[in-house]
Amino acid sequence: MRTATTTSPATGTLPPLSSSTPDVTVTVIVYNDAERLPRAVASVLRQTHANIEIVISDDHSTDATEEVARELAAHDPRIVYLRLPENSGGCSAPRNRALEIARAPYLMFLDSDDELPERAVETLLAAHRERDLDFAMGAVHRVRVDGGRRTTWMPHLVAERRTLDGIEADPRLFFEHLSTSKMYARAFLDRHGLRFPEGIHYEDQLFSAQAYCLAKTFTVVPEPVYRWYIAPYAASDTASISNQRHKLSNVRDRVHVQRLIDAFLAESGHEGLREDKDFKFLKHDFRMYAGDLPYRDDTWLTSFADLVNSYLDTLSEGAYARLPRSERVVLRLLRDRRLSDVRTAARGLGHDVAPRRVTPDEENGRVYWGERVPESQEARRELDLTDLELDTRPFFTALLRHEITRITRGPGASVDLTVRTYDPARRLPVGPQRAVLHLSPGRRRLTVAFRLSPVRPGLFEGRVRLDLAAARLPVHGFEGTRHPVLRLRHRGRTHTGILLAPLAFPPLTARVPYRAGLTPHRVTLRPEGHNPGRLHITWQPVGTTAKVLRPAARRLSTPRTRRAARLVSNVLR
C-alpha cells in the first residue's frame, strides 16, 4: 500500500514505487472536465480486476479539475495525479507523460468523459494471459447523451473472438482506429518506441495504424471494453474534435494525419495495405464531412476542396471502386469543383435519394448524374448511373426526390408545405399523383393525403397542410422526434421516401392541446440541421399533468393493459 507521495512542479502528485506492482495501468486523460472526471475514475475503481493503477493525466486544466483529481487520489492509493506544466492542446502529450510513469506491464487509455464497463480490464487481461499478445481489443458501446440510445461501434469487426497474426489477416480493422478500445503490452510499445504523435489532432488514427502494422499477434474479443459517450449537438466550443468538422483546421489536421499514415506504410514495408487504408479514409473520414456539405457556403466549400482534392488525387482507384455510387458522385463533383451540385448530391447519401435530373447520352446509351454529359473521362466514369437501372428497378426501390420548397405557418399547430417531387427516370405516370404524408409520434399513424400536379416531365408539385394537433398521441404522452415520410402508389406498389426540408428556416413552435392523451404537448418543427436535412418534429409534454399524470400513466401502460385497451376499443367500434 502506498503511504506517501512526493510533489513535483512538472508532474504534480506522484507516488513512490511500492513493492506491489499493478497488473494494468489505466490512464485517464482530462482537461477542464471536473464534473465528469469522478464518473470516469469510478468506472475504473469498479473493475472486477482490482490490481490496477490509475494515472489521472491532466493537460493543465484551468477549472476545478486539479482539486477534484487530488481529492480522488487522496482517497485511493491506486490513483496517481499527474499535471502537465502547460496545456498541450491535445490527447497525445497527457497519454505520453502518463506512459513515462506507468508501472504496469499492460496499459489502457480512458478519456474523462467516457467509462470502462466493469469487466473491461479482466476481459482484456485474460486475453493477454492466454497468449503472448502485443495488444487485445474489444467492443465499444456508443451512448447518446441526448437520449441514451446505445449502439456498438463497428460491430462487424468485433462480432466474434479471434486472434490474428498481423493486420494483413483483416485490413478492415483500420476502421477501428480507437486507442481506447485496446490493452497494450508495455513491452510491445517500448520495443517499437510507439508513442502518440504530439502537436496534431486525430492522433489515434496514426497510433492505431502503427500498432496494427507493427503487431505480430493480437486478439479481438466481442465483450464490451469501453463506453463512449456521444454528444452530437454539443456547443462548438465544447464539442469533441470529431464534432468540430465545421473548422477548416479540423479538415487540415485529418488530411495531415492521413499523409503521415501513408508515409509510415511506405517506410515500414506495408504499402500493400494502402488500398484498404484509402478505402477507410473515403468511407469513414471523408464521409463524415460529406454529410455536412449541404450546409456549407461557397467560400467554405472552396477552401475544403483546396484542402482535400490534392490528397484525393493520391488515393488508389481500387478504393474509389469499392464505394457506393452515391458517394463516388459526391467525390467527383467536389474534385470537379461543381459546388452547387455537391450540396444537391450530398443530401442523398445513405437514403437512396435521386438527383433532381439525369442526362442520357444517346451515343453510348449511358445515363449520367445532373443536367449534362460530363466532359472528362474520369467524370463520366464516376457520374455514370446506368448500373442503377433507374427506369427498370422495382417501384418500391425507385429513386425519387421529395423536397419542401416552402413552409408557412397555418392556424393552430398546423403548417402548410409546398412539396416538389423529382422523378428523373420518369417512373410515375403522366398526370396528377395522389401522395400521402405519414407521421408516427405514437402507435397511431397520422396520414394526410394531397395531390402532386405535374410541372414538367419528371417534376411534380403540391401543397399539403400538416396539422400536428391531429396526431393521436399515446395516453401517457410522447417525448421524442419524428420525421415525416412521403408515400406514393403505382400499379399496386408503394414507394416511401424521406422528405427534405429547407436547410434553414426559423423553428415553429405550438402548444398541442389534450387529445387522446392525458397531457398537452409543446411541438417544435425545425430543419434537421445535419445529414440529409429532413423535417425535424419534436414533441415535449408540458404542464402539471406532464409531471404527475404522465409518469403514472406510463407505469400503468404495460403490454397487458395495452392489449386489454385495444380489445375494448375493437368491441366498442
Image (cartoon, helix red, strand yellow):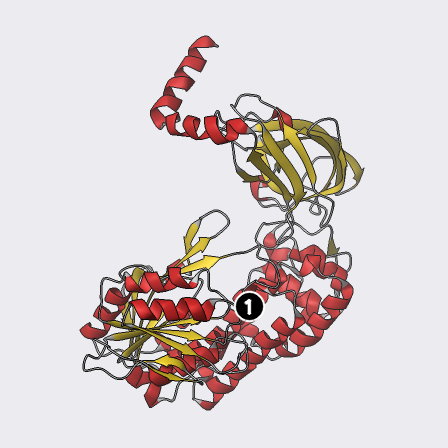
Q: Quadrant of residue 237?
A: bottom right
Count the numbered circles shown. Answer: 1
Please give left or right for residue 314 compared with residue 182 in the image.
right
Q: Amino acid at mark 1?
A: Ile
The relative height of residue 428 versus residue 108 in the rendered view (above or below) is above
The relative height of residue 36 versus residue 398 in the rendered view (above or below) is below
* Residue 293 visible in the displayed image: yes
Q: Tell me the residue at 45%/14% (across/down).
A: 569
Please tell me how crowded label 1 is: few (under 14), some (14-19), or many (20+) other residues with Cα within 10 Å.
few
| Residue 443: x %, y % from top left | 49, 29
Kindly identify which residue carries mark 1. Answer: 241
Outermost residue, top side: 572
Please give left or right for residue 132 compared with residue 458 in the image.
left
| Residue 23: x %, y % from top left | 23, 75
| Residue 396: x %, y % from top left | 57, 40
The relative height of residue 3 versus residue 32 in the rendered view (above or below) is below
Q: Quadrant of residue 451?
A: top right
Please give left or right for residue 459 compared with residue 175 in the image.
right
Please give left or right for residue 393 compared with residue 423 in the image.
left
* Residue 490 visible in the displayed image: no
Q: Tell me the residue at 57%/57% (across/down).
A: 234
| Residue 7: x %, y % from top left | 37, 83
Q: State the residue in front, 266 or 322.
A: 266
